[in-house]
Image (cartoon, helix red, strand yellow):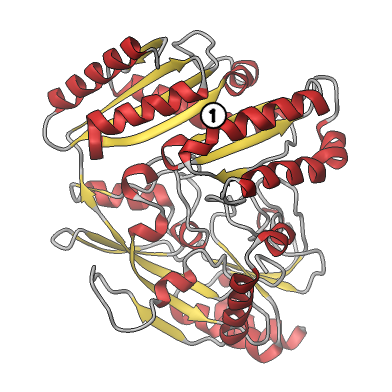
Amino acid sequence: MSAFLDALHARLGDAGLLVGGDLSAYERDWRKRYPGQALAVARPASTDEVAAVLKLCHEHRVAVVPQGGNTGLVGGSTPDDSGRQLVLSLSRMKRVRAVDAANASLTAEAGCVLAEAQAAAAAAGLLFPLSLAAEGSCTLGGNLATNAGGTQVLRYGNARELCLGLEVVTASGEVWQGLSGLRKDNTGYDLRDLFIGSEGTLGVITAATMKLYPQPKDRVTALAACGSLEAAVALLGLARERAGDALTGFEVMNRASLALVARELPQLPQPLGAAAWTVLLELSDAESAEHARAVFEGLLEAAVERGSVEDAAIAQNLQQAQAFWHLREAIPLAQAQAGLNIKHDIALPVSAIPGFVAEMDAALATWLPGAEVIDFGHLGDGNLHYNVQAPPGVAPAEFLAAHEAAINERVYDAVQRRGGSISAEHGIGRLKREELARRKDTVALGLMQAIKKALDPQGLMNPGRVL
């Protein structure tokens, strides 16, 4: 490998190539489930340098693991423990190349932190609506490689729906210039959609052109207590009826998830008393701040009259609204502090969610008494994070080792029976690779394998992930 590393160093220099020393920031995933050992870490500063790296990898048959902010949850962006895989970090490619206000679009490099892309859009008086808890460290390239969702999918869609064009370096080191700002381009196969969600297994996204939207004049945020998940679904229907496209967020949190936050992060205020389910709603109105608040107040009054809501609190200012969102976004942090847990990022038709939760909660209560179900997520778009934690007094790692496989099987069976998906927004990576092979339609798997072989015939792009 010395000839390969020498050639990399000659192209990238000291700042662009890390060999030896402490590389743990690149070798260990956010959940600390997939620690690995990298051959080296390449840190190109331009698309041309990415192309040069991949050409060398192609020539020397070296596997490459593309990495953005390394905030993924499925083990898709860290090397294995062979010491023979090159980590390709896009962290130095972080420029916002252009904001085209007239076209309502933004072009940024793959290493651009999501929050910085949001800020660039805001500086132009526009909104880049992709938003998730890790936005201060996750990157645009990683968001696209995993087709990230987040908290505003209900109105604006996943990363795929927000993307107009891509710049991609192929497995052989060629550069596809597809940074179109067009909303209509019917000229053959949509290559953009091949690379979005491919988790770095087909090529490396180096830049993207994304859609922007008008900034809403006001956002109104509230918490609502519901006695059941069926009541929360009824509230969602009423919110859609009353608010239409102004409904931008609809999150649910079960009693156990907020109790966990209270235990692990007691400094965070919880304005409502304990409820079976707490809903976080947000309305954005581009016409009138007063109109947005009036719609919200009328919506909640109607929900109380119909019995869907037991109690509610409307944020009176931006600080309170941020505190409501912080409560929701603190759940994964509280789980991380509590120890390893069995995570599920599932998608179901909204109508099927109450039945799924009732079935699984009852099964787990009988089978594993004391195990805590931390259930929260984006009810508005049918995405739940149905997570299971060890009973009090049981070591999380031991619980995981003993029960993860069996719990996964029961959860995914129940999801599959209802026409759902085992991965809504986190991707497949290594964590769900075998599940995908077992549960995906065989024709779909065959087509995916054919695409992989055509675009990466040597199998060097993020091997062992997804497929």
Horizontal and vertical percent for residue 46? Answer: 44, 75
Left of 251 or right of it: where is 77? Answer: right
Q: Nearer the viewer, residue 19 or 154?
A: 154
In the depicted structure, whether residue 193 falls above or below residue 289: below
Counting labels gives: 1
Q: Amino acid at mark 1?
A: Ala
Horizontal and vertical percent for residue 381? Answer: 43, 42
Residue shown at the point (59%, 54%) measured from the top left: 70
Quadrant location of the N terminus in the rendered image = bottom right
Q: Nearer the viewer, residue 232 or 140?
A: 232
Q: Is residue 17 visible?
A: no
Left of 36 or right of it: where is 356? Answer: left
Horizontal and vertical percent for residue 220? Answer: 27, 25
Residue shown at the point (71%, 57%) measured from the top left: 435
Q: Is residue 94 visible?
A: yes
At label 1, counting other C-alpha atoms closer than 10 Å, the crowd grade (few under 14, some 14-19, many 20 or more) is some
Left of 255 or right of it: where is 75? Answer: right
Q: Nearer the viewer, residue 371 or 81?
A: 371
Q: Secondary structure at mark 1?
A: helix
Which residue is denoted by mark 1 in the rendering?
A: 330
